Image (tube, rainbow, N blue to C red):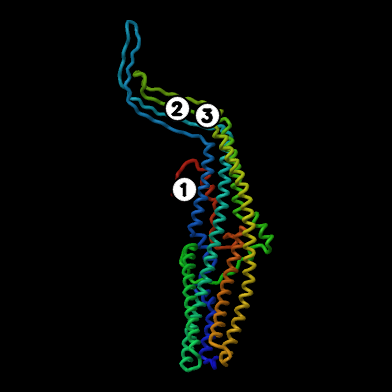
Amino acid sequence: MIRGCPRRFASALGAWAVAATSALIAIASPAAAETLEQALVLAYQNNPQLNAQRASARATDENVSIALGGYRPRFSATSSLSEVYIENVVRAPGGSVRTAGENAVTTFGATGTQTLFNGFQTGNRTRQAEAQVFAARETLRNTDQTVLLSAATAYMNLLRDAAIVELQRSNVNVLEATLRQTRDRFTAGEVTRTDVAQAESRLAGGRSQLLTAESNYVTSKAQYRQVIGIEPGRLTAAMPVDRFSPRTLAGALARARTEHPTITTANYNLDVAVYQVKVAEGALYPTLLVQGNVNKQFGSNTNIGNLQQFTASIAGQLTVPLYQGGQEYATIRQAKETLGQRRLDLETARDQVVSNVTQAWGQLEAAKAQIESTTAQVNAAEIALNGVREEARVGQRTTLDVLNAQQDLVNARVALVTAQRDRVVASYTVLSATGALSPQILGLKVQTYDPVTHYHQVRDNWVGVRIPDGR
């Protein structure tokens, strides 16, 4: 048993408690601090995954212009230059007449074709391309949510791990002081060698926990840099975003069924499949087109005496498919099977969204309860540590009892920091699961990307290879 505990030992423990209490405050200092909202803005602007998806949506916009090309005429021009040797033998009175010579033949021509009817394939391809554009926009919106949630998670992970490092570092400092004091007391004959060994063991464990915490911090820092795009600065505490979510699980499910981009994307993909069936069926219809030709030829391939020749023609062409190996029918059947698959994909998406919302809601409720329990745990651990420390002064507690109480408080504070992180991340997860995690809903101070702008810039372009940004 401990006969007495020097006041400097108690002071060290008290200093550790103050340091542990202020760990989160130190990490969240407002001086030159970076907020979660600022991190979300940076991720929205710079994340390569999000920018790549925007480029994919812009590429999909061009499908509409490609489909509209079926309504437009097609023109081509040809030119040729040839040297021709001609030898003619013609019958004449009294024998035959032979003429021979060389001609330089130059030809210029132009052809124009306009499709009048192709089984409604152009119209269906255009509507299909428009559905693809809408699906690409919803996919982009889903990527927005994924990146913003990843950014919020990376931010909170780094904030948590930084706080845990400070807690573990403060714990190691106190354990070092405890070991020094225990050795002094062992020299004075107040404690045994066992007490010294217990303090040494606990210090080694504390240093191991500090190294683990520092490793986790480095990992979270790398993840932050990957998602946000910059090196992290001094982070500030973040608040949950429950105010943007429905108040009940039923309300969250109702919003998710109508707004979540996974469901809306599946709906548009279903439309794409419907129009693909119509396009395939259009191959069974006749095709009607008008073709005009203009041709100017200098010289002749057959007659040395011809100097030039001009021809112009316009013709209508009707093509009726009868049988072409059965490919059209196989394509139609294939399109119908794909349509059935898309219907099942839509049901799968709805079930997945409902499952995600329910799971996220449960995690949020658990995180709220966890904060309450860990807060009570920290308060109880502080009281217990103070009590054990006072009892150790009068010899009613051992060094091991003090070390155990101190470790209990460290664990409780780490659990509280983790619960606070889980609380914020869970609120963003619920918002994402309902399909409402967007810069507009969050009120981020950033110019939002509008895919409609690019769509109108390229939809009716007849010529040109430059994209709107000038490349």
**Which residue does the numbered mark 3 point to in the structure image?**
290
Rendered image: mark on residue 294: 2
Q: At 53% from the left edge and 87% from the top edge, which residue is drawn?
A: 399
Q: What residue type is labelled 1?
A: Ile
Q: SS at mark 1?
A: loop
Classify 459 as above or below 450. above
Judge left or right: residue 253 versus residue 465.
right
Element under label 3?
Answer: strand
Q: Residue at x 64, y 53 (%)?
A: 350
Q: Residue 422: percent from the left, percent from the top?
A: 58, 68
Question: Which of 142 and 100 lies nearest the eye of the viewer?
Answer: 142
Which one is in front, 1 or 42? 1
**Crowding near the residue tagged with mark 3, few <14, some 14–19, many ≥20 C-alpha atoms within 10 Å:** some
The disc, 1 or 3, on the residue closer to the chain's N-terminal end is 3
Q: What residue type is labelled 2?
A: Val
Residue found 63% across the figure and 70% down from its top: 368
Q: Name the residue under label 1.
A: 467
Residue that lies at the very extreme toward the left in this rendered image: 101
Please state which of residues 254 and 70 is positioned toward the viewer in this rendering.
254
Disc 2 from disc 3: Cα separation: 14 Å
